[in-house]
């Protein structure tokens, strides 16, 4: 949204599964979400934001080794790569021409003189910059698929590593007879299965240790695997993918999909040797920390990123929906943020207060106080939540009733209470994912549309909900809306608009829930008239309320001439309001006739 239209009040989510999207600058955690870079003070909990220069989403972020600069690599057509001073966030340099559509990774070298960036599809271009002069030093295609990370070697000047989908690649800036070139050697997996690689770390010896999809560690010497590391007994180092690796206090730290953080003996890994009889190097972790069950109602965790620090405090990104600060000595953890893991599938706002409800693909339903920027309640269910709607005060005068649809075809009605989200009723109305969920304006009905090509009507009562029946369509409904005060439901299905008159509460559904309702085509003009009528009615209510407030704040003056002028202005405003009211009624009449 353009800044002249509105300003950002709060951003409450974190892209939980993004790779290499977490930095630490002093006591501030830095991550990108949408078109903003977020700065979370881990001590006070305050959050500030830096918008992207172009207004497009942020593709990657990187911190200068001195902590004095921050790189923000954007997305979009010919995206910008911006370098800001920190903490002032004054724009310092803008790098152009590094990639076509989006940046996926960026990193400064240990000296801070060079910056490496990697582009996403379609070019996947690795670019090394003299960023202070905004000049490109070297360029080469990094790979033919997505690249997750790029880093300079902390030990060998001019060496880099990139990794991503099905590969790891080792680069060096080599002097040739035609000048300086980027030369990359693809890691050869040999007899080891091919793996995506998101986590790796360079050891003091110059060898590189990487994770795998199956949970073991690979020790690379050049572009060849020197050995595969597992636990004693041939068990994997982690149950599932290893997503991140780091070195802290002379030990290797790993995190994976099993929600565990493990310490490994650095010297033992560097000296690892294997034979034909023992093709893997077996090692026990020095210590293990599990992040599972840290949030109430959630038993799983997935360690996506670990950022170590010299003060013994780590930042840990849990892709299952949390951001933690972990003490590296005691291994006590403190929750910094809780959020949806994966996509947010629905959003609606309470009619009675500054509370919003969201539904997520992770099966959670969350209530947020968006005025304070705080998470209030979370409820978890066994299936992905696919839609949600907050009922109007016609349904519940207290404004606490919420309807939620799920991927397994279930709908649930919840009540937002002071101590959580209470389940009121649950119905299995569909055989597939619920796409749409709408309370009627009069509060009598709940209409749901799903991927099983049906629209189901439910009677909403104070004591709970009762199923009325469904209407079979030719395809899944792509959009639904109540056309006029609950008298008709308009449904977009494939290439036509259908008008459905909902059933009464006394419908006979003893034999079958399939309703013998006639589906009528709704012309575009009728639909437009209905929608415009509702919009005008809402606008008229807003204008009337604003006029009433203005009259309260502006009483008639004592001067008779001024009072007469103000009365004339009021009369003119009332005539305009009457004309608008006539337009609303005419539009509603056209909608009813259609």
Image: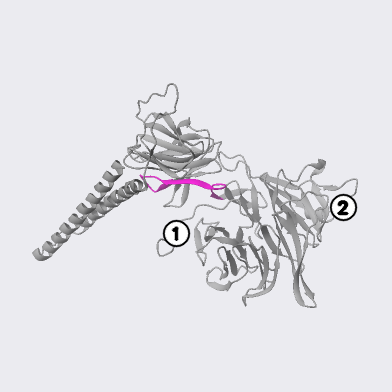
Mark 1 or 2, which is nearer the eye? 1
Residue 38 at x, y percent in the picture: 53, 59
Neighbour tally class for label 2: few under 14, some 14-19, many 20 plus, Cα within 10 Å = some
With 527 as the anchor, is 374 left or right in this view? right
Q: State the residue at coordinates (12%, 65%).
A: 562
Residue 257 at x, y percent in the picture: 67, 46
| Residue 420 visible in the shown view | no
Q: What element carries label 1?
A: loop
Mark number displayed over residue 273: 2
198 is higher (above) or lower (below) than 437: below
Residue 138 at x, y percent in the picture: 70, 72
Bounds of the magenta segment: 336-355
Residue 330 at x, y percent in the picture: 66, 49
Mark number displayed over residue 41: none
Q: What element carries label 2?
A: loop
In space, the residues marked 1 and 2 are separated at their CA atoms by 55 Å
Q: Nearer the viewer, residue 46 or 436?
A: 436
In the displayed image of the protein, which residue is found farthest to the top?
A: 511
Q: State the residue at coordinates (35%, 34%).
A: 444
């Amino acid at each position: 949204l353009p800044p002249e239209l509105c300003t950002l009040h709060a951003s409450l989510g974190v892209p939980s599964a993004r790779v290499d999207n977490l930095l630490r600058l002093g006591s501030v955690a830095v991550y990108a979400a949408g078109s903003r870079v977020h700065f979370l003070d881990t001590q006070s909990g305050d959050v500030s934001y830096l918008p992207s220069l172009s207004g497009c989403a942020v593709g990657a972020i990187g911190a200068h080794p001195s902590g004095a600069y921050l790189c923000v690599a954007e997305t979009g057509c010919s995206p910008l790569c911006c370098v800001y001073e920190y903490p002032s966030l004054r724009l310092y340099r803008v790098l152009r021409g590094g990639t076509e559509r989006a940046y996926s990774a960026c990193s400064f070298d240990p000296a801070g003189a060079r910056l490496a960036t990697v582009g996403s599809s379609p070019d996947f271009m690795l670019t090394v910059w003299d960023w202070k002069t905004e000049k490109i030093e070297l360029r080469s295609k990094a790979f033919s698929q997505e690249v997750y990370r790029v880093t300079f070697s902390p030990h060998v000047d001019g060496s880099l590593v990139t990794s991503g989908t099905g590969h790891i690649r080792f680069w060096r800036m080599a002097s040739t007879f035609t000048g300086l070139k980027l030369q990359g050697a693809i890691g050869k997996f040999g007899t080891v299965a091919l793996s995506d690689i998101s986590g790796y770390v360079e050891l003091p010896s110059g060898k590189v240790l990487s994770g795998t999809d199956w949970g073991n560690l690979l020790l690379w010497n050049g572009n060849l695997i020197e050995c595969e590391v597992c636990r004693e007994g041939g068990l994997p180092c982690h149950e599932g993918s290893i997503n991140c690796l780091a070195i802290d206090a002379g030990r290797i730290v790993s995190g994976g999909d099993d929600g565990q953080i493990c310490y490994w003996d650095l010297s033992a890994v560097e000296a690892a040797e294997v034979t034909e009889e023992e093709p893997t190097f077996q090692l026990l972790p020095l210590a293990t920390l599990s992040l599972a069950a840290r949030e109430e109602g959630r038993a799983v965790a997935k360690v996506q990123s670990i950022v170590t620090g010299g003060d013994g405090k780590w930042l840990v990104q849990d892709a299952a929906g949390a951001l933690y600060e972990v003490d590296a000595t005691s291994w006590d953890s403190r929750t910094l943020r809780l959020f949806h893991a994966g996509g947010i599938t629905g959003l609606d706002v309470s009619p009675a207060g500054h509370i919003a409800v969201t539904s997520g693909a992770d099966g959670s339903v969350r209530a947020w106080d968006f005025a304070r920027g705080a998470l209030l309640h979370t409820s978890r269910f066994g299936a992905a939540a696919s839609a949600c709607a907050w009922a109007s005060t016609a349904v519940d005068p207290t404004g606490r009733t919420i309807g939620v649809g799920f991927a397994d075809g279930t709908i649930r009605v919840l009540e937002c209470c002071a101590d959580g989200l209470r389940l009121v009723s649950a119905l299995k109305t569909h055989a597939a994912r619920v796409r749409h969920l709408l309370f009627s304006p009069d509060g009598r009905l709940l209409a749901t549309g799903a991927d099983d090509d049906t629209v189901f009507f439910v009677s909403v009562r104070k004591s709970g909900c009762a199923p009325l029946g469904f209407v079979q369509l030719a395809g899944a409904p792509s959009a639904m809306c109540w056309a006029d005060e609950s008298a008709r439901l308009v449904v977009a299905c494939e290439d036509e608009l259908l008008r459905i008159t909902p059933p009464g509460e006394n419908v006979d559904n003893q034999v079958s829930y399939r309703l013998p309702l006639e589906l009528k085509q709704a012309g575009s003009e009728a639909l437009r008239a209905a929608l415009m009528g509702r919009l005008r009615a809402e606008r008229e209510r807003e204008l009337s309320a604003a006029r009433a407030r203005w009259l309260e704040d502006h009483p008639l003056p004592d001067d008779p001439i001024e009072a007469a002028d103000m009365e004339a202005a009021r009369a003119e405003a009332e005539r305009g309001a009457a004309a608008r009211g006539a337009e609303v009624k005419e539009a509603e009449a056209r909608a009813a006739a259609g």
